[in-house]
Amino acid sequence: MRETSKICRYGVDNLTLEEIEQELIAGGCFVFYEYCISFVFFTLRRPTEIFFLRASDTGLLRGLPYCLISFFLGWWGVPWGVIYTPLTIFTNLSGGQDVTPEVWTLLQSSENDT
């Protein structure tokens, strides 16, 4: 269970692998969001940590703070701020970048190693 919190810090709430698997079957997923910050001549496009969204959760609300960061701080870089900012906002408004297969594989392999 310790390995689960190292891979995904948000949303797992001490769930066992079996409970996570049931949530995934019900429609849950692992996602990350992106944000963009620009400083005139350079732009940073960074992912957040991984979030576990249960089937009843909406990814849009979790991604909204990162949309706001990008919206207010992302445009100011030339040329990448103008390019990356809409991409990060679109990704976040779409519910984040789904990385469920990769994270699930890591969780299963970490469980087998212990």
Image (cartoon, rainbow, N blue to C red):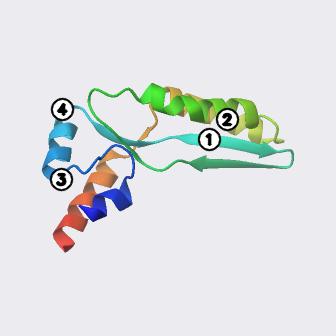
The image position of residue 4, as x and y in percent, is 29, 58
Marks 3 and 4 close (CB-CB < 8 Å): no
Residue marked by disc 4: 26
Observer-side mark, 3 or 4, equals 3
> Which of the labelled discs sits on residue 3, or is there none?
none
* Sequence order check, earlier mark of 3 and 4: 3
Q: Residue furthest front?
A: 14
Give the crowd class for mark 3: few <14, some 14-19, many >=20 residues within 10 Å: some
Determine the secondary structure under disc 1.
Answer: strand
* Sequence order check, earlier mark of 3 and 2: 3
Residue marked by disc 1: 35
Residue marked by disc 3: 17
Please state which amino acid type lies under the numbered disc 1.
Answer: Tyr
* Sequence order check, earlier mark of 3 and 1: 3
Q: Residue at x 23, y 61 (%)?
A: 1
Please state which amino acid type lies under the numbered disc 4.
Answer: Ala
Residue marked by disc 2: 70
Give the Cα separation between the discs numbered 3 and 4: 14 Å
Give the crowd class for mark 4: few <14, some 14-19, many >=20 residues within 10 Å: few
Give the Cα separation between the discs numbered 4 and 2: 32 Å
Marks 3 and 2 close (CB-CB < 8 Å): no
The image position of residue 42, as x and y in percent, is 80, 50
Q: Residue at x 56, y 42 (%)?
A: 34
Give the Cα separation between the discs numbered 1 and 4: 29 Å
Give the Cα separation between the discs numbered 3 and 1: 30 Å
